[in-house]
């Protein structure tokens, strides 16, 4: 044996003696001795509920057989699986590596190689099939490795002798295909720098990822167990316990919460285990865990308290915001919501984000709103997902993407957001960004309509204000349904003076809200009470309705309602009769009596009362008090719908959607459901947008109208187009995109039957606004408006295009026909039509003369033959006589004209000269 090999063998012997000394020190340690004292509680085996270890008094004189016999003391042996006879097991050796980049160091198991853990030496990554291991946990970053051959085998084997010879092939690094270690001639003179430089020899450097500078990593410790059945052995990770692998010490299976581990892989079969801590350490850990748990509970309690306070502030702010129309008060409450949103309150954050987007209550900030919506959408907020869909659809703060908008709308709808369902219903109905599908539109609209109908049953619903900006511009005051402040004050003055009609009118306005007045049940009750005392039957019936429905101002009271309904019904009021019918139908204050209910409803319906017609339809539809009759139900629902009753629309939609009493019609059902959906609480946004426009906040108005336009409101679409048509008004869009956007919304409004929008489409194609000049398309739109809606403007435009031959064959006769039709269709068109016809007549005569060839005609006329030879003398005489007559007539007129009298001075001025003369 050479001197070199002898030194290496001595080194191994020395290291093995150190390990033996460590084990003896562990056995002699006071912690180990005290751990097995009789004072400790019974140690439970970590094998699940009901299986415990007995206390073990381990001493150097105890033998293995005794330990095996006592290992399951206290447990019914029939419950235990059969155990193999215990045999002495050698602890796993952590070998000293040879060669590589960590010669002389010990293997560390497990180690990480290419993302996979290895718990023993492996040949992975080597083509020479040599066993190797890593000496740090993460080989991929540290590159510390060596061979696992035993010292004796390495020294005596011929392969070991030739391993370091110059004839061996290059050693491959175990890092997978294409990555190899260079050959290393291990000697005391080799340095680490050379190895580091050659570590990736043969590999294209561009293909290698940048590696961080290697830093010394503390190897994972495998603790020596205390007590149990394997005292003094090291934990083995991972180990198997009850079919589950554990990669660290655990408290599973123990009621005393002590950490333990297994020293072999399969605890379930080997039962080799021990504690990872002493009792004192376990107690300290448990105290720390209890302290941490108390701290978490305190934090959770504080968070819960803050959440409750935030919810209380949110509810308070929302109550004020929903109950007032005063701008200053709403802005104050929105500032409160900003503070609540800062605490992480989801609903407050959603409300603030919408306020920033729409500029309602807070200064408009689309980019900030977008960021808030993005964060909320990640957290799963359906409202935020719907808002992001709107931003992508409208191209606000984001690049326009109909595909992304559809995705977000879909997520919002799946989360239950009704606005998202409404938007998807409109898109499927119109084929906007999706294939047109009536059935899909019906599904979405029906879901929203169900919710709106339920709200109306509970609250009665509000009045929807639809103001067209274009109509208001062309006819100021006629399109606006909002009462001016001075007119409201005038009606209030009349009501205070005892005018019953003014009292009833103001009461209705305050009861339902609208036309510039906010809903106020207390004031409505006061006005109705004054009118009822004066004997007005409508006021009595409205008081009965208020008592029947109940509110904060008027508590629900069936007896009071019945009293007022009876008074009104006895005087023949249809609303009172309908109220009594409802009382007998539902048994409110009286026993249920379907026959009386039917009679009262019939009396009300005969007088044209819409609620009576609706309830009669319901009774015939459901067969309540009468034989079921769908035809009669359909009749009364149609009558009620003609008066605009929203529940009548809803019932008709259900009948057409299911084919009940009528032939099933999906398009009809969709249109009716859409009408119901547009009466939802979000329709209040129409008035908010109109107010923003009147106050000069055009950008806020545009965004609010855009959101409503996405929901399918035709009025909002036409208003958006009108605002964008005024290129100097909207500032959130650049000049080059206002006309294309306006064209898009004119098109959507025209598709819903708005005649002016159809004419606007013709104008845009005629003049080339937002698109190329296209006379043929302009003619097509004008024809649609003329034939379908008989619009005078469209007829006039068609006449002009026939006259000029623009996009259509020139035909003066057809032009005159369309001019005449325009004059018949609208009295306002008569003056422009008269002027156009005069021009057309002049053009026609000029054209006729041009076609006549006047020179040739005059050359063929012989005046001497027609008038005689002296015709020129006769003509001159005639002209002289005419001129003389004109001159004589003018002279006579000058002689007859009287001179105007001198102006008279006022009496005061006449008296002054007289006084001066005196």
Image (tube, rainbow, N blue to C red):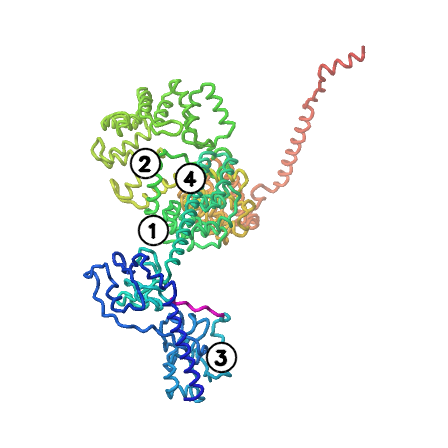
Rounded to the nearest angstrom, the CA distance separating label 1 from label 2 is 25 Å
Rounded to the nearest angstrom, the CA distance separating label 2 from label 3 is 88 Å
Q: Does residue 873 appear in this view?
A: yes
Q: Which of the two labelled residues, at mark 4 and mark 3, occupies the earlier sequence position?
A: 3
Q: Is residue 338 left or right of residue 91?
A: right
List the residue tagged with mark 2. 648
Pair 3/1: label in front? 3
Q: Does residue 816 appear in this view?
A: no
Q: Position of residue 282 (x, y in %)?
A: 38, 57
- 221 inside magenta stretch: yes
Q: Position of residue 467 (x, y in %)?
A: 46, 37
Determine which quarter of the picture holds residue 181. bottom left
Q: Is residue 48 above or below residue 420?
A: below
Secondary structure type for disc 4: helix
List the residue tagged with mark 1. 437
Rounded to the nearest angstrom, the CA distance separating label 1 from label 4 is 25 Å
Magenta-colored span: 215-223
Q: Which of the two labelled residues, at mark 4 and mark 2, occupies the earlier sequence position?
A: 2
Judge the density around disc 2: few (<14), some (14-19), many (≥20) Cα neighbours within 10 Å. many
Rounded to the nearest angstrom, the CA distance separating label 4 from label 3 is 76 Å
- 59 inside magenta stretch: no
Q: Which of the two labelled residues, at mark 3 and mark 1, occupies the earlier sequence position?
A: 3
Secondary structure type for disc 3: helix
List the residue tagged with mark 3. 195
Judge the density around disc 1: few (<14), some (14-19), many (≥20) Cα neighbours within 10 Å. some
Q: Position of residue 404 (x, y in %)?
A: 42, 55
The disc placed on residue 683 is 4
């Amino acid at each position: 044996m050479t001197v070199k090999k002898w030194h290496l063998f001595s080194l191994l012997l020395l290291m093995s003696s150190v390990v033996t000394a460590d084990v003896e020190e562990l056995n002699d340690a006071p912690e180990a001795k005290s751990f097995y004292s009789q004072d400790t509680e019974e140690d439970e085996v970590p094998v699940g509920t009901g299986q415990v270890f007995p206390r073990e008094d381990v001493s150097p004189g105890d033998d293995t057989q005794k330990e095996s016999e006592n290992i399951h003391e206290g447990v019914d042996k029939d419950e235990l699986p059969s155990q193999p006879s215990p045999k002495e097991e050698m602890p796993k050796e952590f070998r000293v590596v040879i060669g590589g980049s960590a010669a002389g160091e010990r293997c560390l198991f497990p180690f990480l190689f290419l993302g996979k853990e290895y718990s023993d030496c492996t040949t992975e990554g080597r083509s020479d099939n040599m066993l190797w291991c890593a000496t740090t946990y993460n080989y991929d970053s540290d590159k510390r490795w060596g061979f696992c051959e035993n010292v004796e085998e390495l020294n005596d084997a011929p392969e070991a002798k030739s391993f370091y010879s110059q004839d061996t092939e290059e050693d491959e690094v175990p890092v997978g295909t294409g990555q190899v270690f260079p050959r290393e001639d291990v000697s005391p003179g080799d340095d680490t720098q050379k190895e580091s430089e050659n570590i990736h020899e043969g590999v294209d450097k561009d293909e290698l990822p940048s590696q961080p500078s290697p830093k010394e990593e503390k190897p994972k410790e495998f603790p020596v167990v205390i007590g149990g059945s394997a005292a003094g052995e090291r934990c083995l990770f991972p180990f198997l316990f009850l079919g589950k692998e554990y990669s660290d010490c655990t408290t599973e299976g123990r009621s005393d919460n002590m950490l333990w581990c297994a020293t072999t892989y399969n605890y379930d079969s080997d039962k080799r285990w021990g504690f990872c801590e002493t009792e004192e350490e376990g107690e300290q850990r448990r105290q720390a865990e209890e302290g941490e748990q108390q701290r978490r509970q305190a934090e959770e309690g504080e968070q819960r308290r803050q959440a409750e306070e935030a919810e209380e502030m949110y509810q308070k702010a929302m109550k004020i915001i929903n109950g007032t129309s005063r701008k200053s008060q709403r802005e104050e409450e929105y500032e409160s919501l900003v503070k609540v949103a800062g605490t992480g309150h989801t609903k407050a954050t959603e409300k603030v984000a919408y306020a920033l987007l729409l500029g309602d209550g807070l200064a408009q900030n689309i980019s900030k709103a977008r960021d808030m919506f993005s964060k909320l959408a990640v957290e799963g907020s359906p409202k935020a997902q719907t808002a992001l869909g709107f931003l992508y659809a409208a191209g606000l703060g984001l690049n326009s993407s109909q595909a992304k908008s559809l995705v977000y709308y879909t997520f919002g709808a799946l989360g239950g957001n009704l606005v998202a369902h409404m938007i998807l219903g409109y898109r499927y109905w119109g084929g906007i960004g999706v294939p047109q599908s009536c059935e899909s539109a019906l599904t979405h609209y029906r879901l929203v309509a169900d919710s709106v109908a339920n709200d109306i049953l509970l609250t009665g619903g509000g009045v929807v204000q639809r103001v067209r900006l274009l109509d208001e511009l062309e006819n100021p005051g006629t399109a606006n349904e909002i009462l001016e402040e001075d007119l409201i004050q005038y009606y209030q003055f009349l009501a205070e003076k005892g005018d019953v009609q003014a009292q009833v009118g103001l009461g209705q306005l305050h009861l339902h809200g609208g036309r510039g007045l906010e809903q106020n049940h207390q004031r409505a009750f006061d006005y109705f009470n004054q009118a009822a005392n004066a004997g007005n039957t409508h006021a009595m019936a409205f008081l009965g309705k208020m008592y029947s429905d109940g509110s904060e101002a008027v508590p629900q009271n069936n007896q009071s309602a019945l009293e007022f309904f009876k008074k009104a019904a006895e005087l023949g009021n249809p609303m009172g009769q309908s109220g009594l019918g409802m009382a007998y139908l539902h048994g409110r204050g009286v026993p249920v009596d379907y026959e009386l209910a039917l009679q009262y409803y019939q009396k009300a319906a005969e007088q044209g009362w819409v609620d009576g017609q609706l309830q009669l339809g319901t009774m015939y539809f459901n067969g309540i008090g009468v034989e079921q009759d769908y035809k009669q139900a359909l009749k009364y629902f149609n009558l009620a719908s003609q008066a605009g009753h929203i529940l009548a629309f809803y019932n008709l939609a259900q009948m057409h959607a299911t084919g009940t009493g009528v032939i099933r019609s999906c398009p009809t059902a969709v249109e009716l459901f859409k009408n119901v959906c547009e009466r939802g609480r979000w329709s209040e946004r129409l008035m908010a947008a109109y107010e923003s426009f009147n106050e000069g906040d055009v950008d806020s108005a545009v965004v609010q109208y855009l959101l409503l336009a996405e929901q399918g409101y035709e009025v909002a679409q036409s208003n958006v187009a009108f605002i964008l048509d005024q290129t100097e008004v909207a500032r959130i869009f650049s000049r080059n995109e206002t006309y294309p956007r306006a064209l898009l919304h004119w098109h959507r409004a025209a598709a819903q039957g708005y005649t002016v929008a159809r004419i606007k489409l013709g104008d845009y194609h005629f003049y080339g606004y937002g698109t190329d000049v296209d006379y043929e398309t302009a003619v097509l739109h004008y024809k649609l408006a003329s034939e379908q809606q008989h619009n005078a403007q469209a007829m006039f435009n068609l006449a002009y295009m026939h006259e000029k031959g623009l996009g259509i064959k020139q035909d003066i006769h057809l032009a005159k026909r369309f001019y005449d039709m325009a004059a018949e269709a609208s009295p306002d068109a008569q003056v422009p039509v008269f002027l156009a016809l005069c021009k057309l007549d002049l053009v026609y005569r000029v054209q006729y003369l041009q076609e006549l060839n006047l020179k040739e005609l005059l050359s063929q006329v012989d005046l001497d033959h027609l008038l005689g030879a002296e015709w020129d003398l006769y003509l001159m005489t005639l002209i002289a006589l005419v001129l003389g007559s004109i001159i004589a007539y003018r002279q006579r007129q000058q002689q007859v004209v009287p001179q105007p009298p001198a102006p008279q001075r006022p009496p005061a001025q006449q008296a002054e000269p007289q006084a001066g003369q005196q």
